């Protein structure tokens, strides 16, 4: 198999992250990472003037890049790897095609002593330990890249194949894909509860959701550094201290005022100060207030609105939104419910109840417009067929590199 086509599994905030090396290369090609303050392992200041020409043939990933090292302009090739050891594993050290490499970009560096080789000599290229310069977590990068396919390449093969199916089979394929996402989320929620306990798991995921895409991973670190007990003891002071402690890590460029992490932390503190110090215990006392979506076999595009009415979704949504105001609002509230509360509640309840239909039918949270338009193209949503979380989750699952369509799709 071509190394660019290999898929590797890593652990992310919300479960396994499956990545192909080509996806990592795309981040470099588009230069969507923090470029100020780049420093190579040897301590040289790095500036990327031209990332190079993306090479889809044998040889380095990018040809004819233009860089500066401590202000000195250099020309050459760039090789990108998930793991630093892949340089030797792929045989680049003895391959003359790689003799002009000037920069080795690695997500996960090795800490073994000794330099990589070019031929029989130690390497002459610089190494950039790249992960710390990415401005969002890997899950978000790869989710965004999957969505980009909807624009750059039309409908990807798994979605294009849906157009060949009858409407009922098309919907069932999306439901099956969404269930895979659901089961993964519940499994991760259970792992987090086992590791940190119920209260801390809710606290951690809540803050991660408040972090939006670019600050989600940082919010995760913050939640572990400042556990729920510290917030309950002094909400306002903890919010200020926590923000300042991570002051040099926040990704603020292009962040709307309402989404600034300082403001989000302040809202969380205000919510706790307004009498929510009994959370997340209150969640479980009110877990029966989650609407019951009923039998998942009855899910279909034409039944979404009817099922929501049957199980009183509007009233339940109003109650939960009131409960979490001003901690989280807008579409981010729905993201919290579908990425956080409902999977966590399922993991806590274990086999007592199945929230899949509730999670599926819940209003959609923060998803790109391209996913919404794709669902319209597939004729899953439209007049009389409202958008819901499950349809969007099915699309996201089908865009993941490890997705395998069921036989017959």
Image (tube, grey):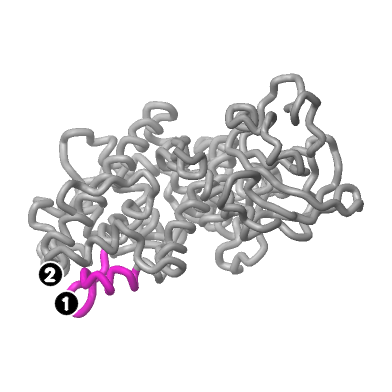
The residues colored magenta run: 372-388
Residue 170 colored magenta?
no
Q: Pick the quarter of the image with the C terminus.
A: bottom left
Crowd class of label 2 (few under 14; some 14 to 19; many from 20; radius 10 Å): some
Quick one: SS at disc 2?
helix
Q: Residue at x 42, y 49 (%)?
A: 276
Going from N to C along the chain, the mark reached first, 1 or 2, is 2
Up-down relation of residue 275 to residue 229 (above or below): below
Q: What residue is pinned by disc 2? A: 302
Foreground residue, 363 or 132?
A: 132
Percent position (x, y) of residue 117?
74, 27
Res 203 visible: no
Up-down relation of residue 308 to residue 16 (above or below): below
Residue 375 colored magenta?
yes
Q: Residue at x 15, y 56 (%)?
A: 172
Up-down relation of residue 268 to residue 5 (above or below): below
Up-down relation of residue 335 to residue 345 (above or below): below
Q: Pick the quarter of the image with the N terminus.
A: top left
Foreground residue, 76 or 239?
A: 76
- Tell me, yes or no, whether the two marked residues, 1 and 2, touch with CB atoms within 8 Å: yes
Q: What residue is pinned by disc 1? A: 384
Percent position (x, y) of residue 329?
43, 63
Give the residue at the far bottom of this rendering: 383
Crowd class of label 1 (few under 14; some 14 to 19; many from 20; radius 10 Å): few
Considering the whole magenta stretch, tell me its main secondary structure: loop
Res 351 visible: yes
Foreground residue, 262 or 171?
A: 171
């Amino acid at each position: 198999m071509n190394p660019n086509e290999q898929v590797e599994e890593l652990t992310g905030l919300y479960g396994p992250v499956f990545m192909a090396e080509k996806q990592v290369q795309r981040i470099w090609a588009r230069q969507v990472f923090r470029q100020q303050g780049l420093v190579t392992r040897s301590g040289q200041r790095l500036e990327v003037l031209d990332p190079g020409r993306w090479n889809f043939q044998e040889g380095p990933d990018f040809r004819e890049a233009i860089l500066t090292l401590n202000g000195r302009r250099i020309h050459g090739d760039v090789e990108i790897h998930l793991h630093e050891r892949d340089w030797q594993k792929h045989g680049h050290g003895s391959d003359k095609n790689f003799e002009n490499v000037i920069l080795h970009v690695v997500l996960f560096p090795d800490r073994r002593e000794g330099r990589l080789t070019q031929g029989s000599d130690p390497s002459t290229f610089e190494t950039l330990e790249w992960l710390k310069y990415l401005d969002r977590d890997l899950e978000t990068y790869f989710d965004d890249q999957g969505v980009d396919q909807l624009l750059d390449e039309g409908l990807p093969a798994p979605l294009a194949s849906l157009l060949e199916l009858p409407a009922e089979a098309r919907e069932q394929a999306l439901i099956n894909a969404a269930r895979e996402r659901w089961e993964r989320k519940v499994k991760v929620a259970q792992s987090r509860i086992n590791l940190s306990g119920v209260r801390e798991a809710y606290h951690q995921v809540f803050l991660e959701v408040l972090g939006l895409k670019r600050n989600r991973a940082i919010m995760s670190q913050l939640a572990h550094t400042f556990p729920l007990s510290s917030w309950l003891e002094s909400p306002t002071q903890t919010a200020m201290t926590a923000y300042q402690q991570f002051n040099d890590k926040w990704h603020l460029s292009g962040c709307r005022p309402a989404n600034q992490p300082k403001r989000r932390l302040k809202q969380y503190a205000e919510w706790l100060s307004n009498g929510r110090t009994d959370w997340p215990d209150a969640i479980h006392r009110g877990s029966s207030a989650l609407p019951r979506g009923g039998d998942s076999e009855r899910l279909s595009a034409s039944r979404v609105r009817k099922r929501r009415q049957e199980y009183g979704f509007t009233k339940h949504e109003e109650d939960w939104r009131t409960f979490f105001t001003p901690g989280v609002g807008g579409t981010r509230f729905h993201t919290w419910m579908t990425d956080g509360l409902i999977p966590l509640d399922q993991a806590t309840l274990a086999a007592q109840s199945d929230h899949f239909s509730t999670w599926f039918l819940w209003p959609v949270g923060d998803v790109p417009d391209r996913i919404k338009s794709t669902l319209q193209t597939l004729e899953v949503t439209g007049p009389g067929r409202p958008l819901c979380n499950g349809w969007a989750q099915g699309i996201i699952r089908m865009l993941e590199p490890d997705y395998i369509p069921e036989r017959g799709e």
